[in-house]
Image (cartoon, helix red, strand yellow):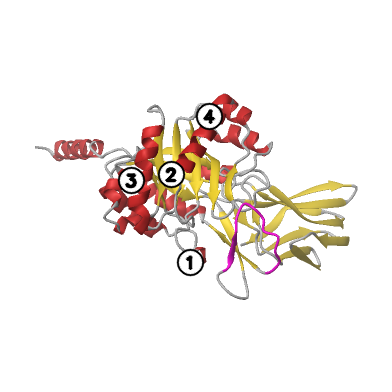
């Protein structure tokens, strides 16, 4: 056998062994819509998200301890125009002392009836109840009863907590629903961070070994602020502003960290993993959420990159100076940036930066935190100069 013949056989064997490798799992991608009041911004966000996300899970109804029931003010016309499969989410606060089963079921039936009267046809109901492990037997009884009252055409799912993995009641509980959504973000104390990719991976693997039915992972695409108090734990501020002064510590799930977990899940999926559900749909003006550009890139598995540049617009010697994010990854405002200029007789920085002028150079220095969404731009200052070198800039993270 000649060397060339042996080499050909070796290459053929390598090629065939490569063909036997399993293809990465195609994960279904869905979105939570969690705003309690819909605005015109929802229309654009829905339209722009349709290419990457198959279904929407919409907050429909909430029960709070002491405050009672509250409905989300959805826009049925927007949901009808969107046309994607729709799941109604019922949030039952984990601090409720007990569930009045008759009342909860009546409220769910009422909201479903109202949605149907408005032309909506949900394909499922999700119950979001952060019950403690000791209350899982009573929760299972409620779910079994709810399943009997819902039409057989509606899928029943639940949001689930990793803490339940240590409960002997979990296996039987999961038999009462069609699927579960394991929440792996901000599950204990936000002060410890919103997300731990390694811990989320371990929880997902354990969950897949316990359930015999499809499950999803709820992943974070958002941030919160922690408001310090003189006593007690910090107050958590998320999509709804809290009318209170004081220092705010911003926490944000890191897109690159979450993207790493998604890549791992595709390469080595836990048993029964059906897909990912992202919290939450990004709206224009929501500063504590990833941009839809970044969220879509993470969901698709694209390479992430924030390419910051400085653009200037000139009119009669007056230059407007803007920071532009040309990449697909949201970026913190840079710590410092410099711009080569000619002689200037007037310069100033805008909110968030200070400006130092030296011969031939403008230096902008960040004095507060902020983020620039992928594809967005932000004015940072102006200058009246004989010239500004459009390409003569440096950005320092």
In the picture, the disc for residue 192 is 1
User: From which residue to which does the magenta span run?
Assistant: 234-246
Q: Can residue 269 be seen in the rendering of this structure?
A: no
In the picture, the disc for residue 267 is 3
Residue for badge 2: 101
| Quarter location, residue 227 | bottom right
Of mark 3 and mark 1, the one earlier in the sequence is 1
**Label 4, label 1: how many angstroms apart (C-alpha)?**
41 Å
The location of residue 390, given as percent across then percent down, is 74, 51
| Quarter location, residue 199 | bottom left
| Mark 2 secondary-structure assignment | helix
Residue 338 versus residue 102: which sits nearer the camera? Answer: 102
* Dot 4 and dot 1 residues touching (CB under 8 Å): no
Q: Residue at x 76, y 59 (%)?
A: 340
Q: Is residue 19 above or below residue 132?
A: above
Single out the mark in the foreground, 1 or 2: 2
> Is 370 in the magenta?
no
Residue for badge 4: 113
| Mark 4 secondary-structure assignment | helix
């Amino acid at each position: 056998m000649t060397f060339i013949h042996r080499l050909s056989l070796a290459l053929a064997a390598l090629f065939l062994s490569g063909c036997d490798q399993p293809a990465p799992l195609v994960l279904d991608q869905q979105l939570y819509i969690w705003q309690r009041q819909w605005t015109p911004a929802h229309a654009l966000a829905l339209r722009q998200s349709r290419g990457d996300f198959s279904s929407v899970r919409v907050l429909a109804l909430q029960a709070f301890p002491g405050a009672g029931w509250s409905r989300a003010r959805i826009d049925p016309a927007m949901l009808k125009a969107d046309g994607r499969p729709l799941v109604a989410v019922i949030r039952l606060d984990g601090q409720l002392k007990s569930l009045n089963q008759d009342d909860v079921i009546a409220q769910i039936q009422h909201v479903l009836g109202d949605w149907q009267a408005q032309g909506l046809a949900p394909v499922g109901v999700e119950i979001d109840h952060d019950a403690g492990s000791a209350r899982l037997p009573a929760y299972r009884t409620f779910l079994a009863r709810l399943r009997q009252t819902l039409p057989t055409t509606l899928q029943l799912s639940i949001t689930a907590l990793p803490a339940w993995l240590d409960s002997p009641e979990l296996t039987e509980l999961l038999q009462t629903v069609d699927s579960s959504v394991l929440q792996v973000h901000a599950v204990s104390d936000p002060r410890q961070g919103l997300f731990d990719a390694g811990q989320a991976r371990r929880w997902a693997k354990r969950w897949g070994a316990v359930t015999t039915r499809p499950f999803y992972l709820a992943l974070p695409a958002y941030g919160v602020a922690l408001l310090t108090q003189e006593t007690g734990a910090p107050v958590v501020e998320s999509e709804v502003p809290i009318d209170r002064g004081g220092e705010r510590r911003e926490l944000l799930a890191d897109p690159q960290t979450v993207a790493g977990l998604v890549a791992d899940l595709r390469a080595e999926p836990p048993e029964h993993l059906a897909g990912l559900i992202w919290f939450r749909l990004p709206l224009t003006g929501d500063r504590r959420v990833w941009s839809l550009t970044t969220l879509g890139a993470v969901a698709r598995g694209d390479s992430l990159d924030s390419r910051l540049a400085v653009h200037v617009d000139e009119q009669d010697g007056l230059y407007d100076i803007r920071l532009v994010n040309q990449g697909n990854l949201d970026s913190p405002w840079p710590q410092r940036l410099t711009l080569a200029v000619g002689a200037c007789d007037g310069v100033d920085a805008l909110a968030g930066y200070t400006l130092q002028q030296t011969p031939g150079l403008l230096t902008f220095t960040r004095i507060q935190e902020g983020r620039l969404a992928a594809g967005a731009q932000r004015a940072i200052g102006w200058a009246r100069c004989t010239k500004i070198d459009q390409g003569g800039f440096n950005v320092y993270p």
